Image (cartoon, grey):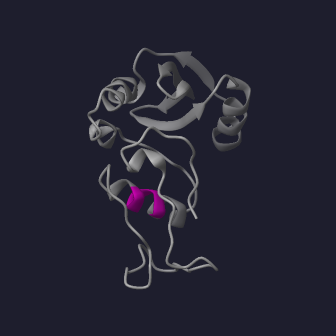
């Protein structure tokens, strides 16, 4: 299997972007390529990493995003992996327009069957990229 990698300099620092075929499968922040590779090996097993100018069109989309076209990243296909439930949650998060927020509060229907609310029901943390601000952290509650 071949994965394509690009390193992008951005306003939030160095980004490591990895794609398989026409979908982004990884985005890491910082200087440590080793941790990104280790995570990808757990998911895909052995692979060959090849440099690419614009894997899955994501480099172009990220540059447009950082220049103000907040919808640019919506056009990038992603393959998040994970369980069926995790993929459903990421899919729902991608439906939230950049610059807006949403909640999974009591009045909101669950995004999938089997949805359960923990001790913080009524709150959802949206990844920064969906709020129209440069990403600072990735955490979903």
Residue reaching furthest bottom? 106
Residue 105: percent from left, percent from top: 44, 79
Magenta residues, start to end: 89-93
Magenta-drawn stretch contains 90:
yes
User: Which residue is located at x 37 percent, y 61 percent?
Assistant: 101
From the viewer's side, name the closer residue of 19 and 71: 71
Q: Is 94 above or below relative to 51?
A: below
Residue ID at (65%, 43%): 43
**Residue 41 placement (x, y as % from top left):** 69, 36
In which quadrant is the N terminus drawn? top right
Residue 64, image x and y in percent? 30, 27
Residue at position x 48%, y 31% from top? 19
In the image, residue 126 lies at what x, y percent? 47, 57
Left of 129 or right of it: where is 32? right
Q: Nearer the viewer, residue 74 or 88?
A: 74
For the point 51% across and 72% down, the residue is 123
Q: Main secondary structure of the magenta part?
A: helix
Q: Is residue 117 above or below residue 63?
A: below
Where on the picture, by quarter, is residue 70? top left
- How many numbered callouts? 0
Q: Is residue 111 magenta?
A: no
In the image, taking residue 22 as reference, residue 119 lies left or right, namely right
Above or below 109: residue 90: above
Location of the C terminus by quadrant is bottom right
């Amino acid at each position: 299997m071949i994965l394509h990698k690009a390193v992008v300099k951005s306003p939030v620092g160095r980004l490591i972007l990895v794609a398989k075929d026409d979908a982004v499968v990884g985005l890491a922040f910082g200087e440590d390529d080793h941790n990104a590779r280790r995570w990808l090996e757990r998911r895909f097993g052995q692979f060959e990493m090849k440099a690419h100018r614009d894997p899955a069109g994501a480099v172009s989309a990220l540059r447009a995003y950082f220049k103000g076209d907040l919808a640019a990243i919506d056009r990038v296909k992603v393959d998040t992996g994970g369980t069926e439930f995790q993929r459903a949650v990421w899919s729902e998060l991608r439906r939230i327009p950049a610059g807006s927020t949403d909640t999974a509060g009591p009045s909101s229907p669950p995004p999938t069957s089997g949805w359960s609310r923990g001790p913080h029901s009524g709150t959802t943390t949206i990844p920064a990229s969906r709020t129209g601000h440069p990403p600072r952290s990735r955490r979903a509650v």
